[in-house]
Image (cartoon, coloured by chain):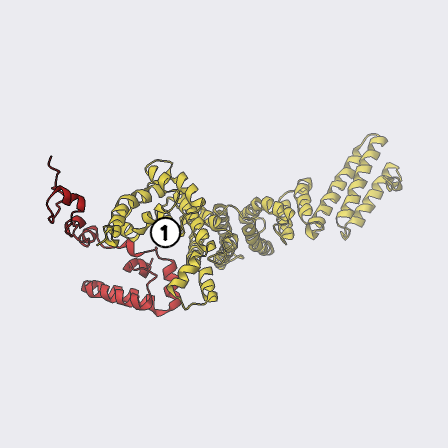
Chain colours: A yellow, B red
């Protein structure tokens, strides 16, 4: 008989696992997960696999030290034996799930990140392919490749489903902390395509929020004064905030908000509190969207942003409308409604100048005021040449000049 | 969440299909009545499609033979009683010993060595 038999090895591994596994799990989970007997039994091979790593002496020496996780992170970043990395990929994914269920999101994300590093290692080293071949020696290389490329797909799909579910919760039950965690989860796994099709978090979130908004707007009667049209948009805004305010979601919301505003305007509800609140909600998103438009990150939303500023301008009177209309034309040069409204604002200002000219005491002052009025007239024409009132105002200007004894042609070349 | 059948049954995923069936049959034989249906369900999941079996294997913890999942007491019992190899074979003294003493066969006891008598 040999002194050191497989039976001895099995017993030693079992005893080592009894001692090491609970301590490792406690450390790696930030002190939040206590190992079960099932964990210890399932992970009997883990300490043995870890011992094959060059980092083992340091890890075991600092196992109960508070900075253990830093050393562990460095160890897995510096590559572990494949068998140990396989244990880590699975165990840390499982710990992340348990930590997220216990709402220990920071520790959960750290475990996710370690799990991802370990999956990356065993996918890149060919370990998974070798293991698949050992399990099914008759499998073809293509079959194995196809299987490995979608190995974690169910896990990704489950997270997408969870995100959709959380985004469909009513605003009172919206769990912002969980949504932030989900956003960070997708950040951790972003761009990882070795074991699953990459998922665009913003894409999923945008479609989910858009679909939810559509469903909620179906129950809103825009022609009724009692219908609450603001809440669905406010909830969508709240969801967007928890997701880190992605521009694409703003864009999705505006796509629904602008037609809603037009419908309200057509129904004669554009001077209601709801209309104003809706415009303000939209404006609060427009700055970020304008920045995204300028950087080329958002496309095709220029006219919608400009519409918002026109609606906002309509709330003001006279010259107070100008800053909003200028903003509208900055984001969407040539925007028809903004140009037209600006043209009218300028004609109105010109009319005020004509009154001022009438009241001026001296000819020099009158001429100066008339020059300003002429400037406004020219700007109004430039803003919207099709403004049918321009001719009428030109006549008024000529009349004012005549009364002041000044030839209107004097201003032509200013 | 449904447990991976390899993890649930504590079986080495690298076992061949034949060995797998033999091991599971053994597990079922030893399992209490209430557990058998569950084990059979795991076995069905493992043997339904080859692709699925490979997928489960990649998503199961490595489980080499040395990671025997039996209880520690059972594992300790599995170790054969320790016996000294010195006690198993009679030792024949060399010529040097013979010069010193009369030629005879000595059965050495490791706990009671034979001292040179001066």
Quarter of the figure that contains the C terminus of chain B: top left
Q: Quadrant of residue B7?
A: bottom left
Taking the view exactly as shown, the residue that stands out farthest to the top is A362
Residue A198 image offset from top left, x and y in percent:
50, 56
Q: Residue at coordinates 50% horizontally, 51% vertically from top-left?
A: A190
- In this view, the residue in front, B98 or A406, is B98
- In this view, the residue in front, A200 or A405, is A200
A330 relative position to B82: left or right:
right
Residue A321 image offset from top left, x and y in percent:
66, 42
Taking the view exactly as shown, the residue that stands out farthest to the front is B99
Q: Is residue A405 visible?
A: yes
Instruction: Please rate how many residues cluster around mark 1, counting C-alpha atoms within 10 Å: few if below 14, some from 14 to 19, many from 20.
Output: many
Quarter of the figure that contains the N terminus of chain B: bottom left
Residue A349 image offset from top left, x and y in percent:
74, 41
- In this view, the residue in front, B8 or A275, is B8
Q: Residue at coordinates 45% horizontally, 67% vertically from top-left?
A: A140
Q: How many marks?
A: 1
Residue A298 image offset from top left, x and y in percent:
61, 51
Q: Quadrant of residue A409?
A: top right
The chain to which mark 1 is attached is: A
A119 relative position to B71: left or right:
right
A280 relative position to A351: left or right:
left
Q: Mark 1 — residue?
A: A87
Location of residue B26 with respect to B72 vertically, above or below: below
Circle 1 SS class: helix
Q: Is residue A310 visible?
A: no
Q: Residue at coordinates 43% horizontally, 41% vertically from top-left?
A: A74
């Amino acid at each position: 008989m040999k002194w050191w038999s497989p039976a001895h090895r099995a017993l030693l591994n079992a005893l080592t696992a009894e001692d090491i596994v609970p301590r490792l799990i406690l450390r790696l989970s930030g002190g939040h997960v206590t190992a079960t007997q099932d964990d210890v039994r399932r992970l009997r091979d883990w300490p043995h696999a870890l011992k094959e790593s060059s980092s083992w002496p340091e890890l075991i020496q600092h196992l109960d030290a508070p900075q253990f996780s830093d050393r562990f992170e460095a160890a897995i970043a510096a590559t572990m034996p494949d068998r140990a990395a396989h244990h880590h990929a699975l165990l840390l994914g499982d710990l992340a799930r348990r930590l997220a269920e216990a709402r220990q999101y920071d520790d959960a994300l750290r475990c996710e990140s370690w799990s991802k590093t370990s999956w990356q290692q065993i996918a890149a080293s060919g370990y998974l392919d070798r293991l698949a071949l050992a399990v099914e020696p008759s499998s073809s290389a293509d079959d194995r490749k196809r299987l490995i490329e979608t190995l974690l797909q169910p896990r990704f799909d489950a997270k997408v489903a969870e995100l959709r579910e959380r985004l469909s919760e009513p605003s009172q039950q919206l769990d912002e902390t969980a949504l932030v965690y989900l956003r960070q989860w997708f950040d951790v796994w972003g761009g990882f395509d070795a074991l699953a099709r990459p998922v665009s978090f913003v894409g999923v979130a945008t479609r989910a929020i858009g679909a939810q908004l559509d469903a909620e707007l179906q129950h809103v009667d825009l022609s009724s004064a009692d219908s609450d049209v603001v809440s669905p948009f406010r909830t969508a805004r709240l969801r967007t905030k928890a997701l880190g305010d992605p521009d694409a979601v703003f864009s999705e919301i505006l796509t629904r908000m602008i037609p809603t505003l037009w419908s309200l305007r057509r129904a004669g509800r554009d001077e209601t509190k709801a209309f104003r609140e809706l415009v303000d909600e939209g404006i609060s998103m427009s700055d970020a969207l304008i920045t995204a438009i300028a950087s080329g990150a958002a496309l095709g939303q220029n006219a919608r942003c400009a519409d918002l500023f026109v609606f906002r301008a309509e709330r003001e009177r006279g010259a107070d409308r100008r800053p909003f209309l200028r903003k509208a034309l900055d984001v969407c040069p040539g925007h028809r409604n903004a140009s037209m409204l600006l043209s009218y604002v300028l004609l109105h200002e010109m009319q005020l100048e004509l009154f001022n000219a009438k009241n001026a005491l001296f000819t020099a002052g009158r001429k100066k005021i008339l020059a300003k009025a002429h400037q406004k007239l020219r700007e109004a024409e430039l803003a919207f040449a099709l403004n049918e009132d321009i001719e009428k105002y030109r006549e008024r200007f000529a009349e004012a000049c005549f009364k002041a004894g000044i030839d209107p042609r004097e201003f032509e070349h200013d | 969440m449904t447990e991976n059948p390899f993890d649930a049954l504590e079986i080495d995923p690298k076992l061949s299909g034949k060995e797998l069936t033999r091991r599971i049959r053994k597990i079922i034989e030893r399992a209490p009545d209430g557990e058998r249906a569950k084990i059979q369900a795991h076995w069905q999941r493992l043997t339904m499609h080859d692709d699925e079996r490979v997928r489960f294997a990649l998503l199961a913890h490595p489980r080499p033979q040395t990671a025997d999942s039996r209880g520690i007491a059972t594992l300790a019992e599995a170790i054969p009683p320790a016996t000294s190899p010195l006690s198993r074979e009679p030792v024949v003294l060399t010529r040097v010993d013979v010069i010193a003493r009369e030629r005879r066969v000595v059965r050495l006891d490791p706990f009671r060595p034979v001292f040179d008598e001066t």
